[in-house]
Each structure stands twice: as C-alpha cells, then as structure tokens.
Image (cartoon, coloured by chain):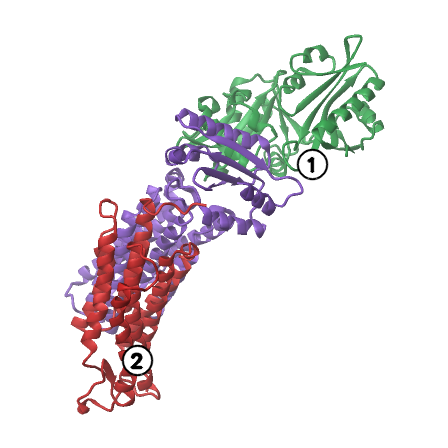
Chain colours: A purple, B green, C red
C-alpha cells in the first residue's frame, strides 16, 4: 500500500468510528427540535459514507482493488456526490440554526439546492466524458481539470457564505452565543489544507471532528437548561448576571410566575407558549419562574402576566403572577441583585 | 369656570373643540381631556397624550387639541393642564400644530416655537394605485392574509413579540388595543406555520381616514414579507374604500421616512409649528 | 538523520487528531465544568491525561529507531510517560465510573484503596523501569529486557517481563469502569445509549494494533470512549431527569 493510502486508511477509519459513535449518541439524544436532530444525523451519516468512499478510492489507488477506468470513475464520482451532499446539508443546517423555520428553507429551496444539483449533474456527465476529472489507470491518480475547480468554488462559496452568515447572526442573537463556529471551522480548515498540500485524504476526519464538536456544544448548552421544565437554570442566571455586569444585556424588567412545585412540570409548557422570544425564562427555585427582559413598559408585562394566568387557569392550574420594572436611578445589576435577595 | 374630565362619554358635548377622531382617541389609555364649563356650557377643551408614562424614561405630554371661546379660557385650560401633569409626573410638554394662532397662544404660555416640516404626509387612493404599480406585486403567497382570520392567541402572541423587541409603531398603547380596534380586512399579516411573523395594521378613524399604526415583520424573510404586506394592504384599500379616502402616514422614525421617500418620492409633510415646555 | 517514515506520519496524524479533538472538547464543555460537579472534574482530568498519552505517543514513534542526538533518551522518556499516563488514566477511568454512575464520593478510602493499590504499585515499577530498561540496560543479548520494557543502544523498543501483567492490569481497570457503567445505569429506559458504544473505540484502539501491529490507536480510542461516555451519559441522564435539573 502506498503511503497516501496507508494514511488515508487510518484517518478515514477513525472518521468512521467517530461519526458512527456520535450518530448513535445524537439518535438517542432527546432534542426538542426534531428537524435539527435529523439534519445533524444526515451530516454524520454522510461523513461515514464519504469516509468509506475515501477508503475505497485509496485502496483503488494502491492497486489493492482491481477495477476498470469506469469503475474508478464511479468511485470518484460517488465520493464527489458525498462531498456535494455534505455541503448542501451543511448549508441547510446553518439556515435552520439561524431561522428555525422549515418555511424559510422551502421558500428558498431553489437557492439551496440548484447549484448542488448542477454540480451533481456535472459529476454524472463527467463519467463518460471526463471533462471535470479523469482517472489515470497507469499512475493510479485522479487528474483534475478546470471544471473541477468551478465545482469546488461553488461548494466552497456556499460553505464560506454560511460561515459568514452564522458569524454575523451570532453577534446579534443572544441565544446563538453558545454556537461555536470555530469548533467546526478550525478542524475542517486544518484537514482540508492538509489534504491540499499532502494529498492525504483527511477531509472526512476534519468533518467528523467538527461535527462531533458541534454535538458536544449542544450537550454543553443543555447544562444551562432545567431538565424538568426546559427553562434556563441557575448556571444561566449566573451567565446573564455577568453579561448585565458587562453592560451587554440591558435588563429593564422582571416578571415572575409562582406555581406549586408538583404542578411545575405539567404547567411549564403552557407558560412557555406565552413567553415572547426575546426574553429569558429561568427556573428560580422549585416553584418560581422569572422572566428577564429588556422591555421597559408596564403594558407588555401586564399582557404577559394576564396571558400566562389565563393559560394556566384554563389548564386547571393555579399561578401567582407579578412583575417589576427597573427604576430610573437604579442600575440593571442592582435591580436584579435586589430582586434575587428579596426572593 | 369649572373644569371637568372629558371622556368618550361626554366628548360630544365638546364637539365644537374636539373633532370626532380625537373624541374616539379619548378612549385610549394615555389620552386625557380637560373641558372648561361656564354656566354648565362647554367653553373650551384641551386634549393631550402621555408619552413614556409607564417606563423609567422621562414622561412627556403632547398637546393635541387646545380650543376655547377666548384666549383667556385657553390660558386657564393650560393652567389646569399643568396641574394634571403633576399627577402623571410629566417633565416636558410639546405640541405640533398647523394652527399659527394656537402656536402663538402656547408660546405666550411658556412654550418654545419653531416651524418644521411635519412628520405626517397625506396619501390618496390614487397614490396607492400608483404605489401598487411600483411594487409590481399582483399575486400574494398563501401566508399573506388579512388579520380578520387570526385567533386572539395568534394576535396577542405577535403583539407581545413586537413589544418585547421594543417595536410598537405609532401606538404606545399597543398592548392595550384589541385586534378589533384595527381594520380587519385591510390590515395584513404574514402567518408562517400558524405563527404570525409580520403585520401591517391600519386604523380607520370615525371621519374615514386610514392611519397605518404598525408595520413590522420579525420572520426569517422579513424583507420580502414586508413588501408583500404593503402590497396586500394597498390592494385591499383600493378595493374597499372610495377614491376620496385619505391615508395619513406618520413618519415617526427614519426607516418609515426612508421607505416613504423611496415609494412616494417627492412627497413632503406640511409645515407645522413645534414647541416644548419644561414642566419639571 | 531524522526522517519521517509513513508510520511517523500516521502517528502524527492520529495522535494530532486526538489532541485536536480533546482541545475542542475542552472548549465545548466550559459550561459543564462550571457546574462544579466532581465527575466533570474527573472527566477534565481524563482529557488531560489522554492528551499526555497522545503527545508521548508522538514523541515515542518519532524517536523510535532513529539515531539523532538524544533519540534514545526521548524514546525511553516518551514510553515511560506514555505508560505512566495510561495506568493513571485507567485508574481515573474506574474512579470516574464510580463517581458518575455509582454516585460514590471522590474520596479514595476503604475498599477503593485496595482497588487502586495494584495500579500504584505498577506506577512505581514503571518509574523504576526507567533505570532498569534504559540506564542500566545495554542490549537484548544481556537476556534482561528491563522490567516492563526497554530501549536498547540502537534505540529499538523491547517488551519486558512485566509488560503483559501491566497491560492486563490496565485492561482490568478499564473493564471495571465499563462494568460499573453497565451495572449502575438505569436499565429500564428505552432511550439509553447502548453500552457497547462506550467501549468499542477503546477496544479497537487497544486490540487491533496489539494483534495486527501498526501504529497505536490507543490515544484516539480512549479519546472516543471517554467522549462518548461523558456526552452520552450527560444527555441521557439529564433528559430523563434522573439527576434533577440544575435549579437556581
């Protein structure tokens, strides 16, 4: 076996083991957002198949699998398809991560899929025509041509666009603060550059590590959630306190909902449904949910407490509601501290 | 002279000073009215609106209407008005009027005065027809519809989302207004997966004017949907209202100003008198 | 002179990937560590130990068989650190399983002391072996190949008489950890992650090179096993509310 083949075998075997293991973990992972879970599973399954194709191509290049030129082209095309599919699923994943909307994906389905379908057709047409790449049966190497570069540019273009959009969005959206783009991009960039400079097929290993770290980030973020209700917990409150202290979160009001402890799990979905998107609901103690927000007017808070009261009472439960507005000469930090001390 | 509170119940008595549109607004949470009576007959009225009264910012008051049989009555009304401000902790009053005489009276009572381009522009049905042709939208996606089909929960959820993001259009009392306060067939909304993501709400005044109150989209495709909402409302307005209907657009911030400059180029507001007075 | 062989490159890649993965894991578990739970702290220790294993593995493979100045010293040091870290990791793994799954305390007292005595003894033997297998060792013709392993004058690594017992001891500690996980996970819930996921990578990493030769996959196998165990149990136990929420 050649050196390249040997390295490729090791790195892709590791990629398969890692991706498969994480696939099982994600499969069993009880994530509220089923769409995000399915997309992540798709990415991982894709990596496994991609790594298998890489191994196949390495064995072919080492002469350990006898095959004809057409067979070699099919293998290479299969690999290219897997890379295309990964890039497309990744783009869908970033869109969904930002907007959490299937509707947005459906509405923009043409932008999301047409270029990849185009590249896929080019790959299929390439099998008999070899206008993108060809397989040299003597040297056992794939020879890439100009059109291959175009396909690569399309894939990379989509990939970097999604990274850029994610980065911009992360700055604006408080709830995306924990999504680590670097955790994915750094390993992937490293292994892709290694591939370009050395010909070692390490791309799938980079993708496997990156995707694993995304999953690790999701589990990490779960530590901020109260397991019973799905609201944020004390750890997140400490995090928000720090952000308030650094003037990165302008706390102006606190609403509170006191529910009997034995009813908390049953009533929390009803309360959750009434909460606006841009506020932070934290389970504070066994029977209390506090909602921190930047709204400064009485009206919206009254609306919120009325709606929660109605929803809970309709469900046969009971809740005590209330809210406090930050006073003019009070800092956000002291406003929160005073509230927490009093409760 | 006697001073009484004007509400929507007795507003008709002061119809010489308060038009029907302003009388209708007296029902709203932040509007206040003081009437002057002499010998039991109405001789004057002042209507004002509180701004930022429910938050930590300095509360302001905008005088909408000041009318009376004489300048003396108007002056007395202003004094009575000042007494009322203390209760609401108002720190500054301001006015905006096209009436030069009123501006003069207010200036005599301690208000500053300057002439500026008013924020309101008036648009006709004919203008709206031109706007429809500019927008070039004739077919609407399924998710763009009138608000008449919305449930109370859907409406309130969206309004809450708007308010918690600090968006309330020109209605500071948006949280207190019911869905029925707006025109149901002309006001549009964008509903995605049963959730309202955007709205363009119009109010029809008793005198028949249409006033856009809120124009927001919070969804993933907000730029596209805002155009659809606008086009949908325009089409419905042209369908349902006579040619002499007036639409008053209040350009209360830069984004509305930029939008109107783009869509209705060259339209300027009337010159108005604007002034403030410190009440602290 | 120093030249990178195919094995060297493969080692660099695999162990480098291990380090990459573990560094990424540390950055993606900051919130978990803030919880201050004892098992999170042990997990962090496991990660560091694994990184030490990966680095020493790289040093060993790069130095083995080479003749540049200091190569033999590097080789022996690398292997010594590697095995010390492996033994410590195996013991820490058992401790992790006890604290995480059996909900034991962190303190090593009573029966637990007895459990870890063989490991501590083996650590001393490996430490002493540095002298036996390097300082006082010349070549295989002496018939004595150190206690656990040795590196001869030509910088080639040899297994010693206590190598197999050391290997068996490490395997026993790892198996004990997995047995504890198997025993003390709540077995009546359908969403539980299959136990084989936890020890599959480690088994492959240890057994395959031992049987077929080639580079060591121990570090990446361990990394995957501890990654899967920690993240898998974190998600399944938190979801099932078995430990309750982290409430304010």
* Camera-side residue of C186 and A308: C186
Residue C145 falls in image quadrant = bottom left
Residue A214 image position (x, y, % from top left)? 37, 54
The residue located at (25%, 56%) in the rendering is C181
Residue B159 image position (x, y, % from top left)? 51, 30
User: Left of C94 or right of it: where is B15?
Assistant: right
* Camera-side residue of B124 and A41: A41
* Camera-side residue of A135 and B21: B21
Comparing labels 2 and 1, the label whose residue is closer to the camera: 2
Q: Secondary structure at mark 2?
A: helix
Residue C92 falls in image quadrant = bottom left
Reading the image, the residue beneath label 2 is C127
* Camera-side residue of C212 and B126: C212
Q: Secondary structure at mark 1?
A: loop
Residue A277 image position (x, y, % from top left)? 47, 38
* Rendered image: mark on residue C142: none
| Residue lying furthest left | A66
User: Left of A168 or right of it: where is C151?
Assistant: left
User: Disc 1 sits on a residue from what chain?
Assistant: B
How packed mark 1 is, by other alpha carbons closer than 10 Å (few <14, some 14-19, many 20 or more), is: some
Reading the image, the residue beneath label 1 is B58
Please, is residue B27 above or below residue C192 in the view?
Answer: above
Residue C43 image position (x, y, % from top left)? 35, 61
Residue B43 falls in image quadrant = top right
The residue located at (28%, 64%) in the rendering is C110
């Amino acid at each position: 076996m050649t050196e390249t083949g040997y390295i490729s075998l090791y790195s892709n075997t590791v990629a398969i083991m890692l991706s498969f293991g994480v696939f099982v973990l994600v499969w069993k992972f009880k994530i509220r957002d089923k769409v995000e879970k399915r997309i992540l599973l798709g990415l991982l399954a894709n990596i496994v198949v991609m790594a298998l194709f890489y191994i196949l191509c390495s064995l072919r290049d080492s002469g350990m699998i006898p095959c004809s030129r057409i067979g070699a082209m099919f293998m290479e095309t299969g690999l290219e398809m897997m890379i295309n599919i990964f890039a497309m699923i990744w783009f869908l994943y970033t869109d969904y991560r930002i907007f959490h909307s299937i509707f947005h994906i459906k509405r923009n389905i043409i932008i999301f899929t047409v270029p990849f379908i185009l590249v896929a057709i080019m790959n299929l047409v390439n099998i008999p025509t070899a206008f993108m790449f060809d397989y040299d049966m003597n040297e056992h190497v794939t020879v890439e041509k100009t059109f291959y570069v175009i396909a690569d540019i399309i894939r990379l273009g989509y990939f970097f666009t999604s990274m850029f959009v994610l980065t911009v969005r992360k700055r604006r959206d408080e709830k995306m603060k924990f999504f680590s783009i670097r955790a994915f991009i750094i390993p992937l960039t490293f292994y892709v550059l290694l591939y370009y400079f050395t010909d070692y097929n390490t791309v799938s290993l980079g993708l496997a590590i990156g995707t694993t770290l995304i999953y690790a980030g999701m589990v990490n973020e779960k530590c901020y959630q109260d397991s019973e209700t799905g609201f944020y917990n004390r750890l997140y409150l400490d995090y928000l306190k720090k952000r308030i202290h650094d003037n990165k979160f302008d706390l102006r009001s606190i609403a509170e909902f006191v529910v009997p402890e034995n009813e908390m799990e049953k009533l929390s979905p009803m309360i959750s449904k009434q909460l606006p998107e841009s506020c932070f609901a934290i389970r504070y103690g066994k029977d209390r949910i506090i909602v921190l927000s930047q709204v400064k007017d009485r009206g919206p808070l009254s609306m919120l407490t009325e709606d929660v009261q109605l929803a809970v009472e309709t469900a046969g439960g009971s809740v005590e509601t209330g809210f406090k507005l930050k006073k003019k000469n009070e800092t956000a930090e002291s406003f929160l501290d005073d509230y927490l001390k009093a409760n | 002279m006697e001073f009484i509170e004007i509400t929507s119940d007795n507003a008709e008595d002061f119809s010489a000073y308060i038009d029907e549109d302003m009388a209708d607004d007296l029902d709203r949470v932040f509007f206040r009215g003081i009437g002057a009576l002499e010998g039991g007959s109405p001789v004057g009225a002042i209507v004002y609106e509180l701004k930022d009264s429910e938050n930590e910012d300095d509360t302001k008051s905008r005088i909408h209407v000041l009318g009376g049989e004489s300048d003396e009555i108007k002056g007395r009304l202003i004094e009575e008005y000042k007494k009322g401000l203390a209760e609401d902790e108002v720190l500054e009053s301001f006015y905006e009027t096209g009436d030069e005489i009123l501006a003069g009276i207010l200036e005599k009572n301690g208000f500053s005065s300057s002439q500026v381009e008013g924020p309101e522009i008036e648009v006709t049905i004919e203008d709206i027809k031109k706007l429809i042709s500019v927008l070039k939208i004739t077919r609407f996606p399924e998710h763009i519809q009138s608000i008449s089909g919305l449930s109370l929960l859907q409406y309130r959820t969206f309004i809450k989302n708007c308010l918690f993001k600090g968006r309330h259009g020109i209605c500071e009392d948006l949280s207190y207004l019911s869905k029925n306060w707006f025109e149901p067939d002309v006001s549009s909304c964008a509903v995605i997966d049963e959730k309202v993501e955007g709205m363009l709400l119009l109010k029809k005044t008793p005198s028949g004017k249409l006033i856009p109150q809120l124009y927001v989209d919070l969804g993933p495709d907000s730029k596209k949907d805002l155009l659809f909402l606008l086009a949908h409302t325009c089409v419905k307005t042209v369908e349902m209202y006579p040619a002499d209907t007036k639409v008053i657009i209040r350009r209360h911030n830069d984004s509305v100003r930029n939008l109107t400059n783009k869509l209705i180029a060259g339209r300027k507001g009337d010159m108005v008198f604007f002034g403030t007075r410190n009440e602290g | 002179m120093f030249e990178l062989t195919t094995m060297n490159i493969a080692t660099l890649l695999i162990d480098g990937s291990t380090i990459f993965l573990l560094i990424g894991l540390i950055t993606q578990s900051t919130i978990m560590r803030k919880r201050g739970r004892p098992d999170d702290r042990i997990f962090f220790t496991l990660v560091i130990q694994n990184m030490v294993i990966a680095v020493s593995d790289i040093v060993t493979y790069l130095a083995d068989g080479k003749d540049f100045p200091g190569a033999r010293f590097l080789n022996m040091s690398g292997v010594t650190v590697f095995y010390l870290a492996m033994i410590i990791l195996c013991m820490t793994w058992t401790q992790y399983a006890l604290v995480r799954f059996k909900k034991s305390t962190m303190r090593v007292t009573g029966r637990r002391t007895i459990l870890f005595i063989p490991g501590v003894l083996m650590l001393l033997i490996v430490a002493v072996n540095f002298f036996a297998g390097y300082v006082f060792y010349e070549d295989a013709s002496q018939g004595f190949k150190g206690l656990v392993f040795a590196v001869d004058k030509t910088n080639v690594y040899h297994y010693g008489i206590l190598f197999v017992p050391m290997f068996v001891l490490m395997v026993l500690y790892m198996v004990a950890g997995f047995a504890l996980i198997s025993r003390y996970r709540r077995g009546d819930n359908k969403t539980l992650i299959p136990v084989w996921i936890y020890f599959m990578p480690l088994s492959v990493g240890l057994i395959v090179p031992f049987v077929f030769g080639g580079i060591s996959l121990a570090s990446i196998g361990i990394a995957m096993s501890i990654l899967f165990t920690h993240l898998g149990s974190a998600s399944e136990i938190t979801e099932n509310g078995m430990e309750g929420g982290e409430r304010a």
